[in-house]
Amino acid sequence: MKSVLKIIVIMMSVFTASLAMPAHAQLSIDITKGNIDPTPIAIPDFMSTDSRGQQIGRDLAEVVRADLERSGLFRALDPNSFIEKQTNIDYAPTYADWRVIKAEALVSGRIVVESDSRMRVEFRLWDVFGGEQLSGLRLAATPDNWRRMAHKVSDAIYTQLTGETGYFDSRIVFIDESGPKTDRKKRLAIMDQDGANPQFLLTGPSTVITPRFSPNSQKITYMSYENIVPAIYLLEIETGRRELLGSFPGMTFAPRFSPDGNKMILTLAKAGNSDIYSMDLRSRSTTRLTTNPAIDVSASYAPDGKNIVFNSDRGGSPQIYTMNADGRNVKRISFGKGRYNAPVWSPRGDKIAFVKSTGGKFHIGVMNPDGSGERLLTESYLDEGPTWSPNGRVILFSRETRGRGGKNEIWSVDLTGTNLRRVPTPGSASDPAWSPLLP
Amino acid sequence: MTRQLILLLTAAAFMTACASKPKVVEEVAVAETPKPVFVPEPAPQAPVVQAPIQQQQPVIQAPANNLPTPGSVDDFIYQAGGDARVYFGYDQFNLTPSAMDNLRAQAAWLQQYPSVNAVVEGNADERGTREYNLALAARRAESVKSFLVGQGVASRRLTTVSYGKERPIDARSSEAGWARNRNGHTNVMNGAVG
């Protein structure tokens, strides 16, 4: 395994070709509505003057097309249908040729391999019907980082056309599952957001569950059964350095970082009673936040760090509650029929994702932080473990099939409840956690 | 409304940045996350629950009538009625009368062999979220431990562990399968003898 720290420099430049088109005439996509028609977009292979660049240009364009298609907001047109073959991205395209094939947006890109250690990617995004350039961007990195550059291109296109931050240059940590249901092996693994580059983060036979990213994407916290009494651990991805978090009189589980990365929120089961604690990661001092004899578990901070959402059965069945970061002002926010679990605050702060079980089915749902506006996005025998995309628009979750051969898969769904898709994983997989956008 | 505003602002930014030559507006250093390196696992921190070697234990007796050797792990299971697990209702952690009978037999055996320690494992069926089930199964393990302690077994001999829904013993997704997976298991890993 390579463990060399590679430094790449990315230079972004904005260059516009045409002036002063009224903003409202520009192509833009409203992603707040479900079931919209995907916007047809043409993304020819990125051009290059040398064969290595041409190969990267083909692969990179393919990754961009796949990213944008998976968002459900775009339909990447078949390159075989393209009429114009551009040779220079610095000249405006023949818009009429792209209107004929009903492309609404066109991406023209170029790869310049400057050396073995440096490659430039430049592209322009054109509004075909508006007849203007919407944005232009130049990225630079080592050539073997072309996949990340592709995701950054996808993010730039997504951001320009939707007005929202993207989520393509990000990673997913998850649990790889193998073996029969009654003897399942569970290993910590990581992959790119699109399923590329999967790799194990830990070896060894211990069962590992519920991994979560730190806000800077450099650390992962998880629960492991490597000792008799299971506990939560901290792993530095870069160095592989691992650490048992704290020493508690009982099992610790359900860890999550605070939004500033300085604290951990976790659950301690002491003499059978689960309560929520916070831990200062610098001083390692802990603060008990709930003292209820009922189950208090699955705590998640709001992005401002001032509030916490958690799961409790203090009312007789598992429901969702919020409280201040110091444990005061506990309020129940779920009141629908059924059992509510596993709440996770959106990185935008505007929604809480949760699991609801009712009538023998499990759902991933979202509600506002005050409990209003509840919507169920999915339904199956067992959907659980929601995690938000960095922009708060997409939710990943585990879906387990029923029966003796029951297996876990990772799925994604839009906040609108549309665009349900299976996320490719090397094998069975559960407990996904989405990283923030990479730097 | 907000989006339109953003678009306007973005457009304005582009116009001001507009020039015939590309203009560098941002420079960001990006560290590609390197491949992780595995660090060998350190020795477990918590003491492994093990029976210390005791001299005063009964001499190993030849099994009679094909019964397990007294004091062995198999003997413990046999004395507990053939199953060292007690079962719970859906989302319940209270002990049923038959569970209490089973645990009384377990407690009697544990008192007969005071050198033996046990891990009390709590388990839940698959129809719940992972973390809630860990909390629920922790309660089940505690219910079993509390009862055994109430019967006179020293608390320090019993370590509780919650497996949540991670260790099903029945792969079926049916009422019968789920009922088997909702249990508290008194796991005697080393008997007083062989």
Image (cartoon, grey):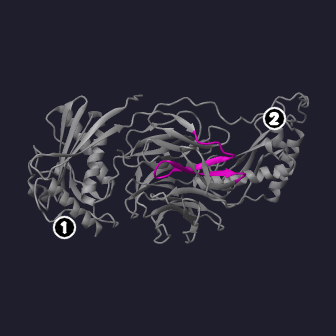
Residue A240, image x and y in percent?
49, 33
Q: Is B169 colored magenta in this rendering?
A: no
Dot 2 surroundings within 10 Å: few (below 14), some, or many (20 or more)? many
The residue at which mark 2 appears reads as: B191
Which residue extends farthest front?
A283
Task: Please give the label number shown on residue A362.
Answer: none
Quarter of the image where the N terminus of chain A is located: top left
Q: Is A245 colored magenta in this rendering?
A: yes
Dot 1 surroundings within 10 Å: few (below 14), some, or many (20 or more)? few
Residue A231, image x and y in percent?
62, 43
Numbered disc 1: secondary structure: helix
Q: Answer yes or no: do the residues labelled 1 and 2 have beta carbons within 8 Å?
A: no
Say which of A97 and B95 sits in front: B95
- Say which quarter of the image contains residue A191: top left
Is residue A373 rendered to the left or right of residue B174?
A: left
Report how far apart the C-alphas of labels 1 and 2 lie in the structure: 79 Å
Residue at mark 2: chain: B
- Say which quarter of the image contains residue A425: top left
Residue A163, image x and y in percent?
28, 60
Numbered disc 2: secondary structure: loop
Say which of A98 and A373 sits in front: A373
Query: Label 2 sits on what residue type?
Result: Gly
Query: Do callouts 1 and 2 point to residues on the same chain?
Result: no
Query: Label 1 sits on what residue type?
Result: His
Question: Can residue B65 be seen from the camera position used here?
Answer: yes
Say which of A365 and A257 sits in front: A257
Is residue A115 rendered to the left or right of residue B84?
A: left
Residue at mark 1: chain: A
Question: Can residue A426 be seen from the camera position used here?
Answer: no
Q: Residue at x 64, y 43 (%)?
A: A230
The residue at which mark 1 appears reads as: A24
- Span highlighted in magenta in the image: A244-272
